[in-house]
Amino acid sequence: MSELGIVVTDIARADGATVDALAAHGVATVHEAMGRRGLAGPSIRPVQRGARVAGTAVTVLSWPGDNLMIHAAIEQCEAGDILVVATTSPSTDGAFGDLFATALKARGVRGLVTATGVRDTQDLREMGFPVWSNGVHAQGTVKATAGSVNVPVVVDGMLVHPGDVVIADDDGVVCVPRLEAEGALAAADARVAKEDADRAAYGSGVELSLDRKGLRALLSDLGIRYVRQDEHDR
């Protein structure tokens, strides 16, 4: 577990243009381009639909049922950031709502990814502040226990260091380590170009994925046989 009781104030952040370009590719493409790494588990789901954002991570490690360190983290947020919240043990209490979102939006923060619950979800949607959370729960929280800001955190299996790139859309959330951001973008660009070519080929109705991806030989190697219906029914 990361050290408790500290607020790191001078984090290095990924390049903004790279962050924006990764956002355009989205979660699934970037996750695949990185070798199927960096993805948060399926408990972290969007409160809204149709939002796609990316930003540099400001991280929070809180105690369950306590949102004190989110208050402390707001001061450390800059335009282009995403706030990422984890707890020292599981908690679905509603640690985040519209007042936090109002303060973060005013600072140019692009969204929230949290292992906790959230509330005021209709207000969050109406104000256009995107959130990915572990659930919706109106349960209130306290402000009583020391945690940390800008330390490494884990959100449903996704490791996030301060300044990493966090991308979130309808498919979930993925984290790109800050020092890997440019390489991940190049790999995502290449993947998109390949998929565009595949899409055009499949759309023509001429090529099948079995042939374009060379999968017929694999089927044969696996012992797959093609049989007629009358042969199968015998």
Image (tube, grey):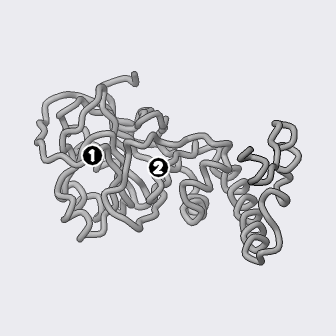
Q: Is 72 in front, or is 119?
A: 119
- Relative horizontal placement of residue 184, taking residue 167 as reference (left or right): right
Q: Residues within 10 Å of mark 2 (few under 14, many from 20)?
A: many
- Relative horizontal placement of residue 50, taking residue 193 as reference (left or right): left
Q: Give percent across and percent down for residue 110.
A: 39, 61
Q: Mark 2 falls on what kind of element?
A: strand
Q: Mark 1 falls on what kind of element?
A: loop
Please name the residue shown 37% across and 23% down the image.
Answer: 3
Quarter of the image where one finds residue 121: bottom left
- Label annotation for residue 135: 1
Please name the residue shown 78% across and 69% down the image.
Answer: 197
Q: Quadrant of the N terminus?
A: top left
Please give the residue where the numbered disc 2 appears in the rendered image: 173
Q: Is 90 in front, or is 148?
A: 90
Q: Give percent across and percent down for residue 62.
A: 27, 33
Asked if the residue under mark 1 is in contact with the one under mark 2, i.e. CB atoms within 8 Å, the reply is no
From this view, report whether residue 170 is shown above or below residue 206: above
